[in-house]
Image (cartoon, rainbow, N blue to C red):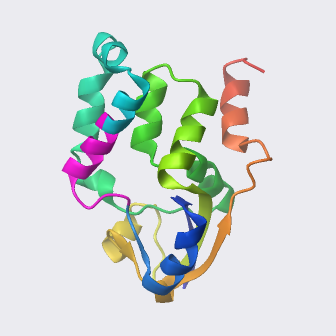
Amino acid sequence: MKVMYRGVRLRESNVDWVRKNGMEYYWKEPEQAINHVFNAIEHFKIMKILVRNGMLKCRILEGAKLGRLQIYGSEEKYLAESYARRTPELIDITLENGLIDKDRIIEYLDNRYGLPHVVTFCIDAEPTYSTEINKICGHFIPPEFITDIEPVDMTKEDPLYTQSRLKVGQI
């Protein structure tokens, strides 16, 4: 058995439900993903910015990819914790492209999708890359695979975010 970690956003009321029923990806169809992109764009009134910088078409095309609508995971817990802060990634990236401040993005994601959590699960395989999880689990991690769900400590700085700022000299 291989221990894997997945960063997700959950409402506290959904944690027990996921333990009992399993975990699905945020959206089942590309149309749902694209609708959520447009909801975020409308919420922040950033359509003109995304059209001007060419990112609107990119985000719609990205949302239309079926491969995006699958569960990925990591063998490293800290990577899942970092990912949980920015998931769903498609929405986070869209808002960053729309020049929305990171704190406002996190507040929106918290309100819309819940707080960041790490789901620990075991699979009966030895994937060499996270996309191989999709061959095993696809859009769904059964409850019997899930061993733990814990909130991400948001008082600690995201180590991946700190590393990326160090690389470009922002700190």
Q: Quadrant of the N terminus?
A: bottom right
| Quarter of the rendering containing residue 46 | top left
- Of residues 126 and 150, the one drawn nearer to the viewer in this rendering: 150
Q: Indicate the position of residue 9 as horizontal and vertical percent values.
A: 53, 57
Q: Which residues are magenta?
A: 26-38
Q: Which residue is located at x 57 percent, y 53 percent?
A: 84
Q: Residue furthest bottom?
A: 144
Question: In this picture, is 107 found above or below 5?
Answer: above
Q: Which residue is located at x 50 percent, y 84 percent?
A: 145
| Quarter of the rendering containing residue 47 | top left
Q: Which residue is located at x 57 percent, y 73 percent?
A: 15
Q: Which residue is located at x 26 percent, y 61 percent?
A: 28
Give the overall secondary structure of the magenta segment: helix
Q: Indicate the position of residue 72 as horizontal and vertical percent values.
A: 44, 61
Is 133 on the left-hand or right-hand side of 12? left
Q: Quadrant of the C terminus?
A: top right
- Of residues 110 and 53, the one drawn nearer to the viewer in this rendering: 110
Is 133 on the left-hand or right-hand side of 165? left
Question: In this picture, is 148 found above or below 5?
Answer: below
Evaluate whether residue 155 shows in this view. yes
How many circles with numbers are drawn on the protein? Answer: 0
Indicate yes or no whether the magenta region holds residue 162: no
Q: Indicate the position of residue 2 as horizontal and vertical percent values.
A: 55, 79
Evaluate whether residue 87 shows in this view. no
Question: In this picture, is 17 found above or below 27?
Answer: below
Question: In this picture, is 86 found above or below 81?
Answer: above
Indicate yes or no whether the magenta region holds residue 32: yes
- Of residues 45 and 24, the one drawn nearer to the viewer in this rendering: 45
